[in-house]
Amino acid sequence: MTSDGGKRAHTWLANTRSVPVNDGEDMVFVQLDKWERGFVKFVTGKPLTFKTEAHEANNVNCKFLDTLQKLRTRAANKAFSEAIAANENGGDDEPKPKKPRQRNAHRDDEAIIDDTVLTLQLPELVNDDGDVIANSVTLKVLWGVKNDVVWIELKEDNLQYIRHGILQSLARGEVGRHWLR
C-alpha cells in the first residue's frame, strides 16, 4: 500500500490475512500494529523513532488506536455473550428462567462463536474547526480481545479513515496507553 504523505510516496508492505466468509468468497484483512515501522511511515510519512536526547519520538501510539482496540474487544465480548446465550437456550427463542453466567471473552473462545469477523460502526471524524475530515465508516475487524494488533478489512476507505483518525489524535496530543512516547 502506498500513502501520499508528503513529498514522496511511502510504500508499506503490510501483513495480510485472507478469511473465508459465508458466501464462499474470501475477505482480506490488514494488520495494524502501532509499533510496526512500515505502518508508522505509511501514516505519518516519517520513520518510527523513539524519544532520545537528540530528537523527539515519531510513532502512532495514540488514543484513537486504543479506542479502536476497545471497540473491537466490546464487539468480541458481545458476540461471545450472544453465542453462549444461544448455546444455553438450545436455539430456542425464549430464554430459560436461569440467568446465564456472564463473563468476558478470552483468546481461546474464538472457536465458540460462529463468525470471527466483527462489525464496528465508527463515527465521522471532525476536526477542531467542525469540518468533517472523514465520513463515518462500517469497519469489519477480526476477532480479538487482549492484543494490541487490530486486523481490519483491506479497503482504501478503511485505511484512509484510520490514517486520518491517527493523525488527528496525534495532532491533538492524545497519547496512547503505552509508556513509550
Image (spheres, rainbow, N blue to C red):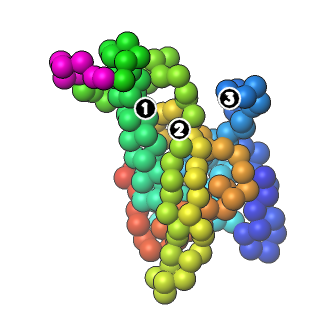
Q: As drawn, is 72 to the left or to the right of 138?
A: left
Residue beneath label 2, please? 118
Residue beneath label 1, please? 79
Task: Name the residue at the bottom extreme.
Answer: 129
Q: Is residue 105 visible?
A: no
Q: For the residue marked with disc 1, what is the amino acid?
A: Ala
Query: How many residues crowd mark 2 within 10 Å: few (<14), some (14–19), many (20+)?
Result: some
Would you say residue 98 sits in the magenta stretch? Answer: yes
Q: For the residue marked with disc 3, what is the amino acid?
A: Val
Mark 1 and mark 2 residues within 8 Å of each other at the beta carbon: yes
Q: How many marks?
A: 3
Residue beneath label 3, please? 21
Which residues fall within the magenta stretch? 94-100
Q: On the rendered image, what quadrant is the C terminus found in?
A: bottom left
Place residue 28 in its image quadrant: top right
Which circle's residue, 1 or 3, is located before the other in the chain? 3
Locate residue 144, reporting x and y percent. Answer: 48, 33
Dominant secondary structure (helix, strand or loop) of the stretch shown in magenta: loop
Would you say residue 75 sits in the magenta stretch? Answer: no
Locate residue 9, reporting x and y percent. Answer: 81, 65
Q: As drawn, is 3 to the left or to the right of 62?
A: right
Residue at the image point whose x is 68% and y is 29% from the top: 21
Which circle's residue, 1 or 2, is located before the other in the chain? 1
Q: Secondary structure at mark 2?
A: strand
Q: Secondary structure at mark 1?
A: helix
Name the residue nearer the viewer: 46 or 25: 25
Locate residue 125, reporting x and y percent. Answer: 52, 70
Q: As drawn, is 77 to the left or to the right of 102?
A: right
Mark 3 and mark 2 residues within 8 Å of each other at the beta carbon: no
Query: How many residues crowd mark 1 within 10 Å: few (<14), some (14–19), many (20+)?
Result: many
